[in-house]
Image (cartoon, grey):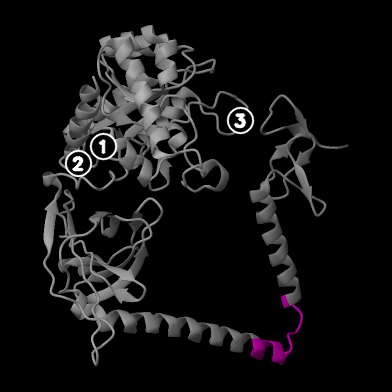
Amino acid sequence: MQVTSHCVNHPSKEAKQRCRSCRKWLCDGCFHRYMGRVYCGRRCQFSGSVKDGFARALARARKPIHAAWVIAAVSCASALLLAVVGVKLAELVAVNRGLEAALSSGDEPREELVGSIEGEGDRYWVDVQGPPQTQLLVVIGDRPSQVLTLDEEGRARSAEIDPNALDGSIRLLRLADGVLELDASAIVRPTPAHKKTVAVAAKAEATPTPGSPAVQFRPTTTRVVRAERGPTPATAPPLLQMVSDAGPRIALTFDGNASTNRTTELLDLLHHNDLEVTLFVTGKFIEKYPSVIRRAVLAGHEIGNHTYSHPHLTTYEQNRKHQLLPRVTKSWFQNELRKTEEAFRKATGRPMQPLWRAPFGEENRSLRGWAMEMGYLHVRWSLLEGASLDSRDWVADEHSSMYQSSERIMQRLLSFPKLGGGIILMHMATERVEPPWAELPTFLEALEKRGMEATTITRLLEDSATWRPWLRRAEDTHREVFEGAD
């Protein structure tokens, strides 16, 4: 008699097969075969293949191995290890030759690097933001530690740093074609309850002369730029996904694009709980539902720009990289923001908040810079230690493995590693039977018990010494661009 059950993805369907790896029951539409075995997906297929490979290797290992094979394997491993050690030693020799000169060289500031020490307990690391693809040498005191490469977003994080080494300064030195070209951030160790962020910019030029080493460095002048002085006008804003120095506050944000299904219920719930939030809406949404926007504004909610037509802006959907799509030019993108602003002013007679959010979270340094030229600061949602404050409330299929009830969504948000300064993402409309925000009052009660306050993005930034200058710059630029146009 054949054993059956119900499919893990479609409970209403009978399942006759089980995944070889995870042993979940699967209906006829949810499994695929690989080498005669049943799997639920690529991950389990890979896991099962690895297990089978180990089993085969273990079976072979029980047979005697010829001594010649052992000698050959040990020789190859030794050669590879020596090659890796040789490359690392060569890198350290090149670094140390120029290190002493680089620590005291440079001219005027060129491009700003921003570095900060972050940590918890006895674990510390360095976060850096700056020009994309920049290579930096991390120097603790006078000892080179590791090499970082800033990604396409201009961000990098170091490996964990020994807390005992933080008694001295930490410097970040730019590496270019094997030559140390100074562009450093000196970082002072923070106390556990407070983080200090400083940025240092300097420039060093190589000037070879006959009979001298290939590289020489001119004397350095170092300029410290503190966060309170505000951002450099020529740079794009850093990634805004957490506001760590905003105190015990968390921002609630809702995105609106094409539908208003059950949006009135959401606005009623927010009004009943005396809660003001940040809404990011598209220009087409404003044109289609101006009365909803006017009601939200009168209720005290702040409205941010979500572009006009909610387009894809980068290639992330295709290759998991935030490279600009061919059609996304500066003028085209800024027109998306401008048309939304115009629609909002026409509907309400007021300006939008100087905030924007990229559709699908697709943004990069260029887009953030182009938006800031119009007075918009980009706002993402919070990610930390593999956890996210994205509610994923857009999943409406109860049979989907990604679906979570409203109660489960709120529990997951409350389990986020650091709620203070966090930014939650939800949506203004839903196709669910139970709206995802149904348990929002319970969530707010839990926040209150923890001494936390739910608020808007603007309030979060106003209470942050790090982000307040960026908000001021966005407000000033936004006023100049749109009121000047009027």
Magenta includes 23?
A: no
Image disc number at residue 421: 1
Residue of label 3: 400
Give the SS element for disc 1. loop
Residue 118 in which image quadrant: bottom left
Magenta includes 65?
A: yes
| Residue interval drawn in magenta | 61-72
Query: Is label 2 in contact with label 1 (beta carbons under 8 Å)?
Result: yes
Residue 479 in which image quadrant: top left
Identified at 51% across, 26% down, the residue is 394
Badge 2 density bin: few <14, some 14–19, many ≥20, Cα 10 Å: some
Badge 3 density bin: few <14, some 14–19, many ≥20, Cα 10 Å: few
Residue of label 2: 245
- The residue lying toward the viewer, choosing from 277 and 283, is 283
Looking at the picture, how far across and down is residue 193, in whole percent?
A: 17, 48
User: From where the camera sits, is residue 45 visible?
Assistant: yes
| Distance from the alpha carbon under mark 2 to that under mark 3 | 37 Å
User: From where the camera sits, is residue 428 visible?
Assistant: no
241 with respect to 464 (left or right): right
- The residue lying toward the viewer, choosing from 236 and 39, is 236
